[in-house]
Image (spheres, grey):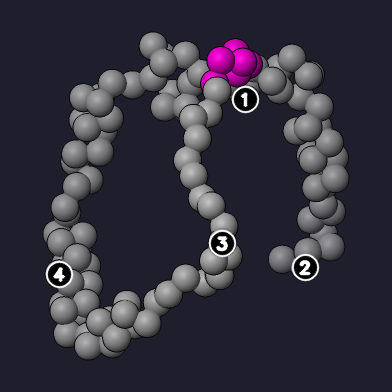
Amino acid sequence: KNCLDANPLNRPTAKEIYEIFNPWSLTAELREQISKADEINNNSSNNKILSTNLGLSYKTHSEAFYASRLLNFNNLPEPKNSDDYYEQNDNIISKEFSESLQIDIAQLNI
């Protein structure tokens, strides 16, 4: 949730993110999965054939002119968190969905 905060000052630093994810990095199970995937990729001769046969999935017009352009971001609205939206609108969306998702558990035959 903090990573997506509209205010960049409330977001975690790169060091904080590193400290969270580092213990999970390259566990024995993950290393084994990576080595198996590498082995499959290296032994597969089909990969080279498939990659050379991949072309554009669409056709371009021979006389079309494609150019890049700068985008103007001066008139963007002020960023806000999605939680703020729900609070300002009295949780209208979540109420709507929660009412439509009410289920009689007895009907589920669990």
Q: Which mark is residue 35?
A: 4
The residue that mark 1 highlights is 82
Q: Position of residue 78 (x, y in %)?
A: 60, 13
The residue that mark 3 highlights is 63
Q: Residue at x 27, y 30 (%)?
A: 17
Q: Earlier in the sequence, mark 2 or mark 1?
A: 1
Q: Earlier in the sequence, mark 2 or mark 3?
A: 3
* Amino acid, disc 2: Asn
Q: Earlier in the sequence, mark 1 or mark 3?
A: 3
Task: Look at the image and tell me whether residue 79 can be seen.
Answer: no
Q: Earlier in the sequence, mark 4 or mark 2?
A: 4
The residue that mark 2 highlights is 109
Q: CA distance from mark 2 to mark 1?
A: 37 Å
Q: Earlier in the sequence, mark 4 or mark 3?
A: 4
Residue 76, picture quadrant:
top right
Q: Residue at x 84, y 36 (%)?
A: 96
Q: Nearer the viewer, residue 80 or 69?
A: 69
Left or right: residue 101 versus residue 1 is: right
Task: Rate crowding at label 2 as few (under 14), some (14 to 19) or many (20 or more) other CA atoms within 10 Å.
Answer: few
> Mark 3 falls on what kind of element?
loop
Q: Nearer the viewer, residue 105 or 41?
A: 41
Task: Rate crowding at label 4 as few (under 14), some (14 to 19) or many (20 or more) other CA atoms within 10 Å.
Answer: few
> Mark 4 falls on what kind of element?
helix
Camera-nearest label, 4 or 3:
3
> Mark 2 falls on what kind of element?
loop
Q: Quadrant of the C terminus?
A: bottom right
Instruction: Examine the residues drawn in magenta and state their main secondary structure.
Output: loop
Q: Earlier in the sequence, mark 1 or mark 4?
A: 4
- Which stretch is magenta? 73-78
Q: Position of residue 101 (x, y in %)?
A: 80, 47
